[in-house]
Amino acid sequence: MAEFEEVAQKSKLHPKPEGLTLQYGTAGFRTNAKHLDHIMFRMGLLATLRSKKTKSTIGVMVTASHNPEEDNGVKLIDPMGEMVAATWEEYATQLANAEQDHLLAALKDIIEKEDISMSEAASVYIGRDTRPSSAALSQAVLDGVSSLGGKTHDYGLVSTPQLHYMVCCCNTKGRYGSATLEGYYQKLSQAFLQLTHNVPNRTDDQKRLLLDGANGIGALKMKELEPFIRSELQVVLSNDGSSGKLNHLCGADYVKVQQKAPQGVSMGVGERCCSFDGDADRIVYYYTDSKNCFHLLDGDKIATLISTFLKELLTQAGLNLQVAVVQTAYANGSSTRYLEDVMKVAVCCTKTGVKHLHHAAQEYDIGVYFEANGHGTVLFSKAAQKQIVELVKDSNVNDERKHAAKLLENTVNLINQTVGDAISDMLVIEAVLAIRGMSVQDWDEIYTDLPNRQLKVTVSDRRVINTTDAERRAVTPEGLQDAIDSLVKKYKNARSFVRPSGTEDVVRVYAEADTQEGADRLAHEVSLAVH
Ligand code: NG1
Ligand code: ZN
């Protein structure tokens, strides 16, 4: 065990509180920051093993996204910038929960199971959000990596999707872009300017966008990006972190769940606004109309806007590529109906959590995936990208086809295909609205959302609820689904489901119906059935 001497020594500086157990959930480990020091050290160890195993750079992001400022969390990023493979999530849980005396044994167990050669080099990229606890916690990750002899690159303050991007750039030897913040801003801004600079007659109002930065990392990063895109987009930033608290009464999750505007943003009637979440991987848009009524444009509206745009461009370019949209059970029923019946695009429903959507989207030529909460991106298959690039170069095609192909090529470059990215998504949406000459109201009117309500219920053990059919039906506890079915029958156009959250100790209840009152009442009744 001499080779693990340093791990043994350093782990004493990051001791595990006895009896504390945590799960690698939907988005990694997430809980109050004071319980996470040992988890961070151990995730440094695990990332090093994963790097040796894959012979690639692995990412470790310290963030708790939209959770309160006191929380923190960590997730691992696999070589292509995607979420870590499922078996390794299990290893993460095992390593995290091994009592102090068993840590080396747990580590050795993973090394044996995966047949890892410890002489292999390891490289780990690390990033963190703006939480007060994040600096010390990312230091614990660095300690973990170095105690196994791994090399680290600490990007410091970056958004979650920026770190995913860096990992992918590194492992594709620069083919996806250069693994620096400058490279990220250059790639996105060049694509955005190419898409927008020839759009005629754009007024200053059309170029203006209000942004709620959730007092988080997204606000910081927007300030860095701003000089690159200023000529085509004027972003008016609020909740920039200079005084307010992270995610408090602001940010994408607050706006989506509360269905109201964030505090700290002064919105004029009809003005186009958007909110990032705490690690800038989610975005939602909104505006208020002349009757002071609030309108939310969530992930479903974003998926509809982008997939419609892509489909039109493919037709103009004469490219026969299939566009599909991947959603979860939380997608508004109106969006699914519109996409299937009007747009005639294939719609697929997966379990909650980006890794599920991402994998499903990989099955198509072009897979647009968004969670209703605004987390999503677009994946283009290698073959689809090749066809687009070849068409741009082809000298035998007419101008219309070529123009469409060029727009497609720039859209591919503007999208962060590794994971949902609020900054990249925002630029895509702004480009589509500009090119199509659409206002936020025009976009909103594509279809009308069914009124809906999301509630959280606290129960003694949320794991007694097990679900099937992409989480749309509960199989346990017995009788729960029957109870939900009979409640749903009382309402028109209604739907409801429950599932245990993977990031909080709650059960989530979702309901939609033909009126807001009905959706609220149904959600309430279902939450009583959960108790
Ligand atoms: P849980 O807590 O498992 O519902 C939430 C979001 C997910 C996903 C993760 C990770 C909802 C209903 N759930 O998961 O979509 O974004 O957090 O951040 O929005
Ligand atoms: Zn997030």
Image: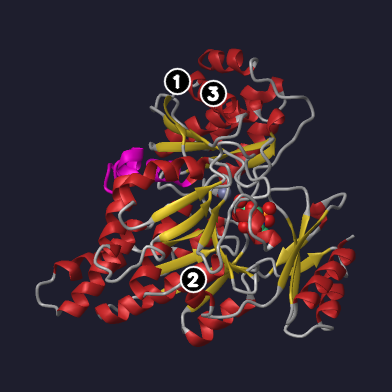
Task: Specify whether residue 419 is in view.
Answer: no
The tag on residue 139 is 3
Q: How many marks?
A: 3
Q: Residue at x 51, y 80 (%)?
A: 446
Estimate how packed mark 2 is, as few (under 14), some (14 to 19) or many (20 or more) residues with alpha carbons within 10 Å.
Answer: some
The tag on residue 218 is none
- As shown in the figure, which amino acid type bears the numbered disc 3? Gln
Q: What residue span does the magenta drawing correspond to?
A: 161-184
Looking at marks 3 and 1 on the same chain, the residue that comes earlier in the sequence is marked by 3
Mark 3 against mark 2, which lies toward the viewer? 2
Looking at marks 2 and 1 on the same chain, the residue that comes earlier in the sequence is marked by 1
> Along the line of sight, which residue is nearer the eye, 286 or 419?
286
Residue, disc 2: 440
Q: Main secondary structure of the magenta part?
A: helix
Q: CA distance from mark 2 to mark 1?
A: 52 Å
Q: Secondary structure at mark 2?
A: helix
Q: Tell me the quarter of the picture where residue 331 sits.
A: bottom right
Task: Specify whether residue 267 is in view.
Answer: yes
Mark 3 and mark 2 in contact? Answer it, CB < 8 Å.
no
Above or below for 363 versus 141: below
Q: Residue at x 56, y 65 (%)?
A: 286
Give residue 272's position: percent from left, percent from top: 50, 64
Q: Secondary structure at mark 3?
A: helix
- As shown in the figure, which amino acid type bears the numbered disc 2? Val
Estimate how packed mark 3 is, as few (under 14), some (14 to 19) or many (20 or more) residues with alpha carbons within 10 Å.
Answer: some
Q: Residue at x 48, y 30 (%)?
A: 48
Q: Tell me the quarter of the picture where residue 425 sits.
A: bottom left
Residue, disc 1: 149
